[in-house]
């Protein structure tokens, strides 16, 4: 039976109402989805911002090790070129970071191991070829369904911390070595002082004036050695702890050298050693006067100590473009290669007797090294057995 016109019009009206209802519902759903999408994009933007502002690097990979996401800090720490970072598969990046590791074979072995044990966590310290040390941690991403969805790696730069730790270890080692050296080197002069005082106490009235003068001279020498050792020790300790003031100014180098020679000349005269100041009278040096004199005093004193009677010591200074190169040259007994390689190191510090059996604490060259480096200069020793020794150090013209 055919529908009447009125029935058809009613059905059409019903269909229009249903369509309008569906259209309104679709618009609402579309709007809700669009808002949800915008919210998700905004959240993603914030999450990426948080990730890229983090002080640590992190990398997300899928279960087969392919890169999913990494933050800017990871790119910075691993020095990854942008074209490598943009590679979607991450193959180029794996090759790059492998070669950034100091031990590439171990780096790959770690990745292979975690690929075979996907649910394990890992943590280690990784050294890169540029000197960076990373605290590296990784953990699997396991869903509520127990499925492994990949792995997150984090990289924390601990380079400065490791430097400080190593410095503290070295300082502690130096301290122990320092105490050992001080106790050993002070033992002899203090024992001499003790023995001489004991002899004087027990036999004072039986000694002649000349004998007493001899005892006093011996006491003075022993006390002077002990005092010098303690002074070197305190100066070195203050320098190591950063408590020693550093006040560089401009001086005439020839005057500084002359002052040092005047102090050491009496000891040189006892061995009939000639000390020659060959420094040009117009040369200037920018340095801390106390430290510069301490450097020269130790180097010239060592030259006197290891030069035979009637020997010769020459002090020269050469001007270069950036620094003043100062040399202290003697024609003494020289230094063997075995001893030469141990100079400037407290861990292997040696103290040898001079040509007249002079003794020292062995701290002199350590002080020289500390003071020269305080000036951003360098110091080294050249020597040949039975032909002499040349001590050389540089002082920049201007403060750096």
Image (cartoon, helix red, strand yellow):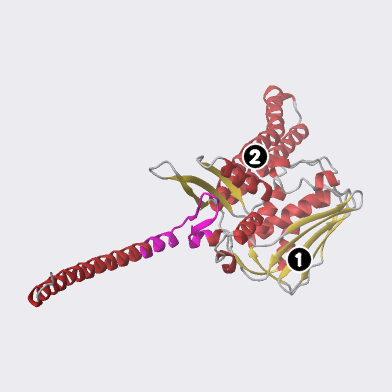
Element at badge 1?
Answer: strand
The residues colored magenta run 45-74
Residue 61, x across and y down, in percent: 51, 53
Residue tagged 1: 325
Residue tagged 2: 178
Q: Name the quadrant containing residue 34.
A: bottom left
Element at badge 2?
Answer: helix
Q: Name the quadrant containing residue 11.
A: bottom left
| Residue occupying the point 14% across, 74% down | 12
Q: Does the magenta portion include 395?
A: no
Q: Residues within 10 Å of mark 2 (few under 14, many from 20)?
A: some
Q: Is residue 287 left or right of residue 381?
A: left
Q: Quadrant of the C terminus?
A: bottom right
Q: Is residue 168 visible?
A: no
| Residue occupying the point 78% across, 52% down | 266
Residue 211, x across and y down, in percent: 77, 32
Q: How many marks?
A: 2
Residues at marks 1 and 2, CA–CA distance in whole angstroms: 30 Å
Mark with earlier residue (1, 2):
2
């Amino acid at each position: 039976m055919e529908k009447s016109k009125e029935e058809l019009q009613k059905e059409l009206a019903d269909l229009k109402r249903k369509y309008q209802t569906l259209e309104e519902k679709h618009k609402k759903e579309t709007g809700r989805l669009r808002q949800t999408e915008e919210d998700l994009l905004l959240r993603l933007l914030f999450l990426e911002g948080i990730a890229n502002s983090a002080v640590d690097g992190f990398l997300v990979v899928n279960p087969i090790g392919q890169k999913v996401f990494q933050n800017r800090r990871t790119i910075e720490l691993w020095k990854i070129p942008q074209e490598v970072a943009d590679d979607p598969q991450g193959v180029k990046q794996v090759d790059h970071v492998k070669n950034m590791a100091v031990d590439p074979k171990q780096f790959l072995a770690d990745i292979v191991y975690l690929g075979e044990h996907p649910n394990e966590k890992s943590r280690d310290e990784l050294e890169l070829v540029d000197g960076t040390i990373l605290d590296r941690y990784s953990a699997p991403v396991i869903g509520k369904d127990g499925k492994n969805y990949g792995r997150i790696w984090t990289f924390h730069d601990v380079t400065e911390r490791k430097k400080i730790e190593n410095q503290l270890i070295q300082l502690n080692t130096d301290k122990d070595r320092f105490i050992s050296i001080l106790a050993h080197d002070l033992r002899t002069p203090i024992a001499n002082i003790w023995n001489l005082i004991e002899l004087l106490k027990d036999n004072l009235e039986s000694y002649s004036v000349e004998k007493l003068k001899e005892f006093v001279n011996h006491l003075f020498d022993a006390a002077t050695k002990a005092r010098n050792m303690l002074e070197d020790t305190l100066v070195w300790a203050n320098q190591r702890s950063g408590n020693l003031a550093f006040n560089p100014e401009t001086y005439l180098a020839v005057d500084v050298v002359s002052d040092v020679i005047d102090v050491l000349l009496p000891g040189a005269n006892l061995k009939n050693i000639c000390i020659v100041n060959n420094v040009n009278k117009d040369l200037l040096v920018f340095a801390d006067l106390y430290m510069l004199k301490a450097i020269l005093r130790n180097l010239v004193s060592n030259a006197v100590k290891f030069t035979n009677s009637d020997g010769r010591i020459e002090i020269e200074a050469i001007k270069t473009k950036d620094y003043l190169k100062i040399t202290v040259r003697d024609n003494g007994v020289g230094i063997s290669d075995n001893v030469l390689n141990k100079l400037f190191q407290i861990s292997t510090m040696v103290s040898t007797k001079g040509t007249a059996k002079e003794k020292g604490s062995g701290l002199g060259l350590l002080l020289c090294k500390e003071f020269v480096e305080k000036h951003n200069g360098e110091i080294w020793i050249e020597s040949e057995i039975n032909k002499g020794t040349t001590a050389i150090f540089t002082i920049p013209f201007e403060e750096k």
